[in-house]
Image (cartoon, rainbow, N blue to C red):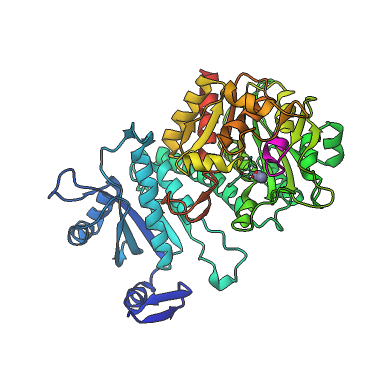
Amino acid sequence: MAAHVRCMRTAGFVTSQKLCRLIHTSVLRNKGLVLGLYEPATKGEDFILSKAAADFDRKCSSKLASFVKSSSKKLKKGGHRVLFDNNAGFSSIAVCCVGKMGAGFNEQEQLDEWRDNIRTAVAGGVRTLRSLGETDVEVDPCGDAEAAAEGCYLGLFVYDELKAADKRKAKVTSSCFTEPLIDRYSTEEQWQRGKILAEGQNWARHLMETPANCLTPTKFAEIVTTQLQELKCQVHVRDKNWIENKKMGSFLSVAKGSAEPPKFLEIEYKGSKGENHISLVGKGITFDSGGISIKPAADMDKMRADMGGAACTVGALYAVAKLHIPISVKAYIPLCENMPSGTATRPGDVVTAMNGKTIQVDNTDAEGRLILADALCYAQTFNPQLVLDMATLTGAIDVALGSGATGVFTNSTPMWDILQKASVRTGDRVWRMPLLEHYTKQVTESQLADVNNIGKFSRSGGACTAAAFLKEFVTNKNWLHLDIAGVMMNKDEIPYLSKGMSGRPTRTVVEFIQRLAQLQSS
Ligand code: BES
Ligand code: ZN
Ligand code: ZN
């Protein structure tokens, strides 16, 4: 067994072998470098250094090339080797395999593999350098600085602020490794865009991960107000009186089981002149116990992330505002807890939504659709060009798609096409689901009211009946409903996201909005 020694630099345990390297390098500035490497075009040939790596190699008398030759025999896409030496001021260099040089759009996978390979390779490299104690890391753009920045910042995300200081991972600052090349400016611009996209997603991850006792509706509203007002967004936090005045009886029926007061967030980003705008709506259940139709205890803690729709909405707005995308966006976020209590809604109760429709609540655990019904009605009173909602709505979408893709239900094929293409680029994919009359019948045949909050064949097609329910509250011709329950969490499927809440599909939504803005201006 390898001897383990406490290391001051990493505040963790390292093998004695590693320690030797660390002692050797500790005189340096804890500065690491990530460089890219492509797989050989054919077997037997050498690995190919990226442009930045080749430039760097020239400066260190081909030390890098010979290191790669000697160490990369079994190196595969996404893997890396670390060179410890004093090379131009870097105490360690992670040489990361980005896969094949010619990788591109993969039709079967509906994925831009080139970009995804870069994200994965860079994330692996920066994590290893962090574990070696580097606190300052420069990253090779690997041919796409935006994807490299995404891999870097998404890969380094951790939620450990509630742990003791010595159990937390060290903070790492990162930057783009750009030589004074002719294209330096645009590379740096791309890096900054990737960084902002990752920051938006990381903010969503952070909010989703935060325990429900620390992130009540009130606290969520406070945090979002502080953050987005700084980015020149207008934020209104509406209280229970306002919600009652708007006659959002469906939303209130969920909130009334909890001691925490509900909030309704209205956020505006004005990126263009005039009244034209798009609407985002996010499910903001800060904790979903199921209410009187209480959930089983196992995994109930994960329901702290049942505000994932709200988190991705504000994460996307953060990026849209920081990137100054020339389009106006309004966001609507109903926030409350779903709890069982003496004041909670009972199965069989009938409530009335803002549009006057009555709803029989046969299962209080199908609460997301109840709060979204009112938020959708309200959003549409401002006549948006498009409405996109995000919600951790059903366990059924997880059964159908797992974490492979977000399930999308839409009445607009042109909008679907744009969203789908956006997701190929971001690697955070979407998959179209049916929005058929077949499912509508199953929610509109209610014994006591206009609609029932669960389908009459309860378990069958659960994600589709939930979408059909929402459709009863939609009049807009460009509506997209994103059921994100399946992609809410990452186990180890997406290599550049660590285990935990994923913040998916924040980057896809930003890319979608950017594409809409481009279409409008052309
Ligand atoms: N928040 C859950 C859905 C969910 C499940 C999100 C797993 C993330 C992971 C939602 O409110 C819910 O409980 N839905 C029910 C609906 C059913 C009662 C018709 C479900 O999916 O079981
Ligand atoms: Zn529920
Ligand atoms: Zn829920």
Magenta range: 362-372
Q: Which residue is nearer to you in this view: 376 or 124? A: 376
Q: Which residue is nearer to you in this view: 258 or 417? A: 258
Q: Is residue 207 visible?
A: no
Q: Is residue 53 shown left or right of residue 382?
A: left
Vertical arrangement, residue 403 with respect to residue 379, above or below: below
- The single residue placed furthest to the left in the displayed view is 44
- Give the residue at x 39% y 75%: 14
Q: Is residue 202 visible?
A: yes
User: Which percent across, then down, holds residue 187?
Assistant: 40, 41
Vertical arrangement, residue 82 with respect to residue 442, above or below: below
| Ligand 2 quarter of the rendering | top right
When asked about the image quadrant of residue 409, the answer is top right
Q: Quadrant of the N terminus?
A: bottom left
- Give the residue at x 50% y 20%: 414
Q: Is residue 364 shown left or right of residue 402?
A: right
Q: Is residue 449 shown left or right of residue 303?
A: right
Magenta segment includes 195: no
- Give the residue at x 51% y 62%: 171
Vertical arrangement, residue 469 with respect to residue 124, above or below: above
User: Which percent across, then down, holds residue 48?
Assistant: 21, 48
Magenta segment includes 368: yes
Q: Is residue 250 shown left or right of residue 190?
A: right
User: Which percent across, then down, holds residue 87?
Assistant: 30, 63
Q: Which residue is nearer to you in this view: 76 or 447? A: 447
User: Which percent across, then down, holds residue 124?
Assistant: 38, 56
